[in-house]
Image: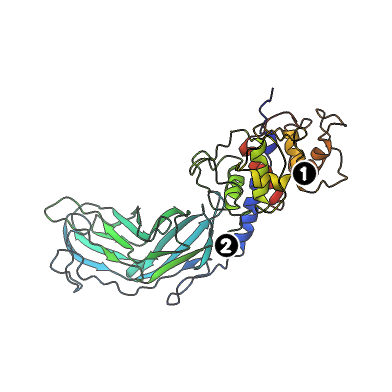
C-alpha cells in the first residue's frame, strides 16, 4: 500500500531565498526623482511639485470673491457669510512612488522607469506640506458665524495594473484648522495615498500611471447651494512608468493562473516555473491538480519536457505502451538511460511513481554521478536498489527527507511534490 508523503521536507527556506534574490534585483533600481520639469527632493523616488498660483476660475457657482477671482462658491467651508476667501499655490509637496516586491512585507521607493514583476504591488503617496499663503496656508477663509467643515482630498491615478483605461481613486480626510471663534479656517497640509495596485499578467509591459488631476474637494454643508469647490494642485504632466522586468523562470516566473494553486502553497513558485518552462501545461487550462499522484508515464514526460523535448531517439521497445501514446517520444528519449522498465519489455506506464523511483529517475537523468555521501536515513537499507539515487538527491539538496531520519521511499509522489523537486533541480541557486 502506498502512503501519502509528508510535506515536512518542503518546509525549507526556498521561498525566503527567492525573496532575497528578488530584493537584490530591486536593490539595483536607480532611486531618483521623476519628471524633467519638476524639482526633486533628497528623498529617493520622490518628486517636488511647485505649481505656483492656483487657477481659481470656473470651479464653483458663486459670483466672485474679495480676492478678485471668479466663480467662487461662497459656502466653500460650511455655512456662514464669507468675508475673504484665499487659495494659494503649493510650495512644499512631493509624490513618492514605491514598489513592494516581497509579498506585502515592505515597499521600496523607486524611480521613473523602474522594473516590476507579476505580483508586485505599486503605491503612490502625494503630500502637500504648506502653501505660499500667510502661515503656509494652502486655503484660508475668514467667516462670520458658520460651522466647521471637513475637507477631503481625492487622488485620481491611472491604474495600469489592470490595463490602460482603469482609474483608481482614494479619499482621505484633510484637517481644517479653526482659528478663534470659528472665524478663520485654513488648510496647511494633507496627504493622500492610492494603491497598492497589484501588477499582474494583464498589465502592460510598460505601465504608465498618470497623476494629472489631484484635487482638494470640500465637503459642502447642507444648504440651498451645494458646491464642491475643486481645484487642481498638481502638475498636469506628472506621470510614472514601470517596465515589466525580463522573465527569468527560476526567479520571477509568470503566474501559471491555475485556480487550484494558491500563493501560499509551497509548490506555488515551482508550478509557475513548470508552466513557464514548458514542463507542464496543467491537467486543464485552469487546473494543475497538485494532489494527484504522478504516473510513470507522466514522470518521463516531465523529465523529457524539462530537457527541451528532444526527438529522434530509437523506439523504446516496451510491449505495454500503445502506439501513439502521448508519452511515446518521452519514453524513447528516457529508455534505457533513465529507465529500463519494471520488467523485461514492460514499462508499466500507469503505475504510481514512488519516492524511491523518483530518486532513481532524477539520479539517472543526471548521468548517475558517484560517489555521494551516505543519505543517513534509517528507513533505507544500505543495499537498497535506490540507495545511490537517494544519496545523490540529498547531496545536491533536493530533499532533506520527510523527517530528520526518514525518507519514506514507498510513499507516492504527487504533482505538487514533483514540480518542487524538478524546480529545485533546475534552479539550484534560488
Residue sitting at x 88%, y 45%:
371
Which of these two is toward me, 292 or 184? 292
- Frontmost residue, 264 versus 184: 264
Residue 412 visible to the viewer: yes
Up the image or down, 96 lies above or below 51; here it is: above
Q: Secondary structure at mark 1?
A: loop
Q: Is residue 406 left or right of residue 54?
A: right
Residue 14 appearing in the image: no
Bin the neighbour count of mark 1 within 10 Å (Cα to Cα): few under 14, some 14-19, many 20 and up: few
Residue located at (21% from left, 66% from top): 59
Q: Residues within 10 Å of mark 2 (few under 14, many from 20)?
A: few
In depth, the one of 338 and 211 nearer the eye is: 338
Q: Position of residue 400 (x, y in %)?
A: 75, 38
Q: Is residue 9 above or below residue 330?
A: above
- Residue 244 x/y as whole percent: 52, 62
**Whole-Å distance between the Cαs marked 1 and 2?**
38 Å
Please tell me how many numbered marks the rendered image carries.
2
Q: Which mark is residue 336?
A: 1
In the rendered view, would you say 118 is above or below 342?
below
Question: In this orientation, which residue lies closer to the viewer: 19 or 42?
Answer: 19
User: Which residue does the numbered mark 2 point to in the structure image?
Assistant: 246
Q: Position of residue 174 (x, y in %)?
A: 34, 55
Quadrant of the image occupied by residue 338: top right
Considering the numbered disc 2 on the image, is that residue within a helix, a strand or a loop?
loop
| Dot label at residue 2 | none
Residue at figure coordinates x 60%, y 43% from the top left:
324
Question: Nearer the observer, disc 1 or disc 2?
Answer: 1
Q: Do the CB atoms of the residues marked 1 and 2 lie less than 8 Å apart?
A: no
The image shows residue 246 at horizontal and vertical percentages of: 57, 62
Amino acid at each position: 500500500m502506498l502512503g501519502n508523503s509528508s510535506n515536512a521536507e518542503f518546509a525549507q527556506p526556498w521561498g525566503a531565498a527567492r525573496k532575497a534574490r528578488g530584493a537584490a534585483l530591486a536593490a539595483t533600481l536607480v532611486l531618483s526623482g521623476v519628471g524633467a520639469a519638476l524639482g526633486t527632493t533628497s528623498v529617493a523616488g520622490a518628486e517636488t511639485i511647485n505649481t505656483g498660483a492656483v487657477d481659481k476660475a470656473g470651479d464653483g457657482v458663486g459670483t466672485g470673491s474679495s480676492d478678485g477671482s471668479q466663480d467662487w462658491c461662497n459656502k466653500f467651508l460650511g455655512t456662514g457669510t464669507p468675508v475673504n476667501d484665499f487659495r494659494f499655490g503649493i510650495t512644499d509637496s512631493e509624490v513618492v512612488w514605491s514598489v513592494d516586491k516581497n509579498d506585502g512585507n515592505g515597499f521600496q521607493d523607486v524611480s521613473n522607469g523602474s522594473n516590476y514583476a507579476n505580483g508586485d504591488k505599486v503605491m503612490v503617496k502625494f503630500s502637500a506640506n504648506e502653501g505660499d499663503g500667510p502661515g503656509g496656508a494652502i486655503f484660508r477663509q475668514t467667516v462670520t458665524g458658520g460651522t466647521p467643515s471637513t475637507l477631503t482630498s481625492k487622488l485620481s491615478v491611472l491604474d495600469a495594473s489592470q490595463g490602460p483605461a482603469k482609474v483608481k481613486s482614494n479619499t482621505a480626510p484633510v484637517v481644517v484648522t479653526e482659528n478663534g471663534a470659528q472665524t478663520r479656517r485654513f488648510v496647511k497640509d494633507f496627504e493622500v495615498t492610492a494603491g497598492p495596485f497589484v501588477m499582474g499578467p494583464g498589465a502592460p509591459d510598460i505601465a504608465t500611471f498618470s497623476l494629472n488631476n489631484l484635487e482638494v474637494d470640500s465637503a459642502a454643508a447642507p444648504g440651498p447651494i451645494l458646491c464642491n469647490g475643486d481645484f487642481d494642485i498638481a502638475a498636469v504632466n506628472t506621470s510614472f512608468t514601470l517596465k515589466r522586468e525580463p522573465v527569468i523562470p527560476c526567479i520571477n516566473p509568470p503566474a501559471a493562473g491555475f485556480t487550484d494553486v494558491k500563493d501560499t502553497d509551497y509548490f506555488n513558485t515551482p508550478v509557475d516555473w513548470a508552466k513557464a518552462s514548458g514542463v507542464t501545461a496543467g491537467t486543464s487550462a485552469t487546473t494543475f491538480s497538485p494532489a494527484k499522484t504522478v504516473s510513470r508515464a507522466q514522470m518521463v514526460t516531465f523529465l523529457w519536457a524539462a530537457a527541451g523535448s528532444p526527438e529522434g531517439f530509437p523506439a523504446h521497445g516496451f510491449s505495454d505502451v500503445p502506439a501513439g501514446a502521448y508519452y511515446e517520444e518521452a519514453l524513447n528519449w528516457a529508455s534505457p538511460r533513465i529507465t529500463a522498465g519494471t520488467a523485461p519489455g514492460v514499462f508499466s506506464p500507469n503505475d504510481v511513481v514512488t519516492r524511491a523511483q523518483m530518486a532513481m529517475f532524477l539520479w539517472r537523468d543526471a548521468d548517475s554521478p558517484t560517489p555521494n555521501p551516505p543519505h543517513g536515513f534509517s528507513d533505507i537499507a544500505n543495499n537498497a536498489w535506490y540507495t545511490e539515487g537517494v544519496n545523490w538527491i540529498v547531496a545536491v539538496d533536493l530533499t532533506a527527507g520527510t523527517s530528520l531520519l526518514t525518507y519514506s521511499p514507498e510513499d507516492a509522489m504527487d504533482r505538487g511534490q514533483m514540480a518542487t523537486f524538478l524546480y529545485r533541480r533546475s534552479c539550484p541557486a534560488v
